Image (cartoon, rainbow, N blue to C red):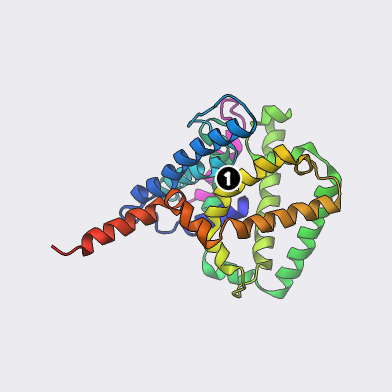
């Protein structure tokens, strides 16, 4: 998610353009409301539970749309300051001390991940080009390999910090120790982001076009994942390399399935409502008098 958020920030450079926030309401908040309803109905159906619909508490993956909208708002104000990066990190660290910043309106995740969004906004094309040098790629490969090995064998509960959905007190941390822990995680996540981006090819591949439709995969994959978690418990527990390979294969399959042309055609009005609005507006303008 930090890398996804950083890239989202990189493409937010036109946030001062007229009509930007009106466009964001249609692009982000409308799908948020729609899919909150869909997911609530879906979970109620497959788990045979009472319908629990709350727009103030984003369901699972839906927090990203709400937070993305908030990051654009925050960007408008914080980008005016000279030391905006320091301010964003300070806000992110302090937010963890507030026990009431839990899952309501995705406040904690919004504040915690904002430094990545701001970093993406501040980055320029030449910064990404620097990451493509051979020494950087080799160091990135070593770092990510070491990080993967550590995570695989560690079984450390503190990895839940990466979710950024709970205050420090939930994990039993307080005082300066909690702040130091958060700063350490920021450092690791920022290095992991740059390492990942350095290894991503800049050449066009057979799957490059899938990147255009990431929102389709993001919003639709939850239905498949939740269904298979309910039907196939193996997705709940990964304790072998075979299980890990199965999960990777499942994820790749979902990427292709959720971006198929007929899937996009059926769901585009829900996932990209602004495209429909823009098309209707253009049709109205071009309509002969």
Q: Residue at x 22, y 64 (%)?
A: 286
Task: Specify whether 192 is left or right of 69.
Answer: right
Q: Which structural element holds mark 1?
A: helix
Q: Residue at x 40, y 51 (%)?
A: 273
Q: Is residue 174 visible?
A: no
Task: Specify whether 70 is left or right of 160.
Answer: left
Q: Residue at x 53, y 51 (%)?
A: 117
Q: Which residue is mark 1?
A: 113
**Above or below, 201 relative to 144:** below
Question: Badge 1 local density, few (<14 within 10 Å), some, or many (20+)?
Answer: many
Is 83 a magenta residue? yes
Comparing 166 with 188, the one in front is 166
Is 174 a magenta residue? no
- Residue 95, image x and y in percent? 57, 34
**Image mark count:** 1
**Above or below, 224 relative to 132:** above
- Residue 257, image x and y in percent? 61, 57
Magenta span: 82-102
Q: Quadrant of residue 92?
A: top right
Q: Is residue 30 visible?
A: yes
Which residue ends up furthest to the left in the rendered image?
A: 289
Of the 4 image quadrants, the one containing the C terminus is bottom left
Q: Residue at x 72, y 69 (%)?
A: 137
- Residue 277, image x and y in percent? 33, 53
Comparing 104 with 111, the one in front is 104
**Above or below, 275 relative to 62:** below
- Residue 130, image x and y in percent? 62, 71
Q: Quadrant of residue 225?
A: top right
Task: Specify whether 44 is left or right of 266.
Answer: right
């Amino acid at each position: 998610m930090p890398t996804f958020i950083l890239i989202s920030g990189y493409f937010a450079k036109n946030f001062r353009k007229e009509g930007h926030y009106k466009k964001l309401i249609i692009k982000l908040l409308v799908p948020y409301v729609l899919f909150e309803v869909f997911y609530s109905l879906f979970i109620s159906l497959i788990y045979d539970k009472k319908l629990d619909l709350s727009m103030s508490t984003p369901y699972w993956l839906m927090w990203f749309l709400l937070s993305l909208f908030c990051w654009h708002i925050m960007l408008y104000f914080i980008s005016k300051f000279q030391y905006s990066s320091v301010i964003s990190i300070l806000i992110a660290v302090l937010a963890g001390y507030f026990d009431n910043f839990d899952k309501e309106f995705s406040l904690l995740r919004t504040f915690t991940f904002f430094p990545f969004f701001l970093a993406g906004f501040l980055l320029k094309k030449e910064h990404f080009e620097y990451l493509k040098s051979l020494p950087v790629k080799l160091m990135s490969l070593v770092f990510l390999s070491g990080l993967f090995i550590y995570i695989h064998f560690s079984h450390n509960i503190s990895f839940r910090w990466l979710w950024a959905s709970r205050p420090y007190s939930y994990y039993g941390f307080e005082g300066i120790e909690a702040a130091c822990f958060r700063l350490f995680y920021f450092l690791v996540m920022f290095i992991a982001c740059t390492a990942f981006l350095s290894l991503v090819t800049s050449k066009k591949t057979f799957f490059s076009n899938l990147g255009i439709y990431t929102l389709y995969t993001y919003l639709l994959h939850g239905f498949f994942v939740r269904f298979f978690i309910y039907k196939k418990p193996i997705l709940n527990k990964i304790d072998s390399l075979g299980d890990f390979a199965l999960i990777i294969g499942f994820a790749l399959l979902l990427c292709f399935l959720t971006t198929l042309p007929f899937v996009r055609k059926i769901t585009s009005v829900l996932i990209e409502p602004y495209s429909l609005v823009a098309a209707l507006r253009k049709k109205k303008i071009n309509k002969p008098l």
